[in-house]
């Protein structure tokens, strides 16, 4: 006896259950509670001068290794023991305080004296003293926050700067 004999050839099969996956034409609810769906995430590059100087140092070291020495990024990874994502984050100043061991690996792998990176990052034995917070008018601090906010449009920032220049000249 076969399965066809038991079920009969005219017995319709049950429809498969409906999928619970999101239909591509379904529009999500567009409220602030739904998060950053389909929105760009701002770049979180550090504004710290040491991180920016270190980023320039890493970019220069990588460019020299690739262009002057003919190394590929895989060669750099092999010699330093670091992943390319780490080096690229350093190059974009996305890491404010890199790990000392990784920085030393990077320098040793590329034949750069460790003291160069240590001086750039302020590791030369003297911890950098934090600059005191200047007593700035709260309105000016609000303007500065607005100018440093990546969510503010370039046009608005240009208008703010033009207004500040006008006021600085004496109106």
Image (tube, rainbow, N blue to C red):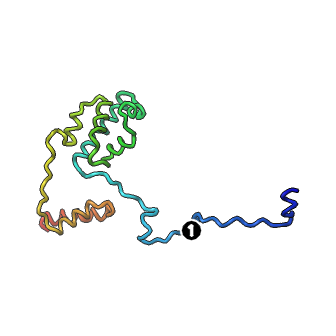
Task: Inspect this view and state whether residue 11 appears.
Answer: yes
Q: Quadrant of the C terminus?
A: bottom left
What is the crowding at mark 1: few (fewer than 14 residues within 10 Å), some, or many (at least 20)? few
Q: Which residue is mark 1?
A: 26
Q: Quadrant of residue 78?
A: top left
- In the image shown, does 161 or 69 lie closer to the viewer? 69
- In the image shown, does 105 or 135 lie closer to the viewer? 105
Q: Quadrant of residue 73?
A: top left
- In the image shown, does 49 or 4 lie closer to the viewer? 4
Reply above or below: 171 against 118. below
Along the horizontal axis of the image, is 9 left or right of 97?
A: right
Query: How many numbered marks appear?
Result: 1
Q: Quadrant of the N terminus?
A: bottom right
Q: Quadrant of residue 75?
A: top left
Residue in the image at 39% along x and 40% along y: 84
Task: Inspect this view and state whether residue 24 appears.
Answer: no
- In the image shown, does 101 or 65 lie closer to the viewer? 101
Residue 131 x %, y %? 13, 53
Residue in the image at 13% along x and 49% along y: 129
Residue in the image at 56% along x and 68% along y: 26
Reply above or below: 89 against 150. above
Name of the residue lying farthest toward the front = 1
């Amino acid at each position: 006896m076969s399965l066809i004999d038991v079920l009969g050839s005219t017995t319709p099969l049950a429809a498969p259950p409906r999928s619970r996956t999101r239909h591509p034409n379904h529009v999500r609810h567009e409220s602030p509670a739904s998060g950053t769906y389909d929105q760009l995430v701002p770049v979180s590059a550090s504004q710290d001068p040491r991180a920016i100087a270190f980023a320039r140092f890493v970019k220069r070291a990588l460019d020299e290794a690739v262009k002057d020495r003919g190394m590929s990024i895989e060669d750099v990874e092999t010699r330093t023991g670091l992943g390319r994502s780490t080096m690229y984050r350093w190059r974009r100043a996305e890491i404010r305080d890199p790990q000392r061991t990784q920085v030393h690996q990077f320098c040793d792998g590329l034949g750069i004296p460790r003291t160069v990176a240590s001086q750039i990052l302020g590791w030369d034995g003297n911890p950098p003293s934090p600059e005191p917070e200047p007593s700035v008018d709260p309105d000016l601090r609000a303007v500065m926050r607005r100018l440093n906010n990546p969510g503010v449009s370039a046009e608005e920032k240009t208008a703010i700067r033009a207004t500040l220049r006008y006021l600085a000249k004496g109106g």
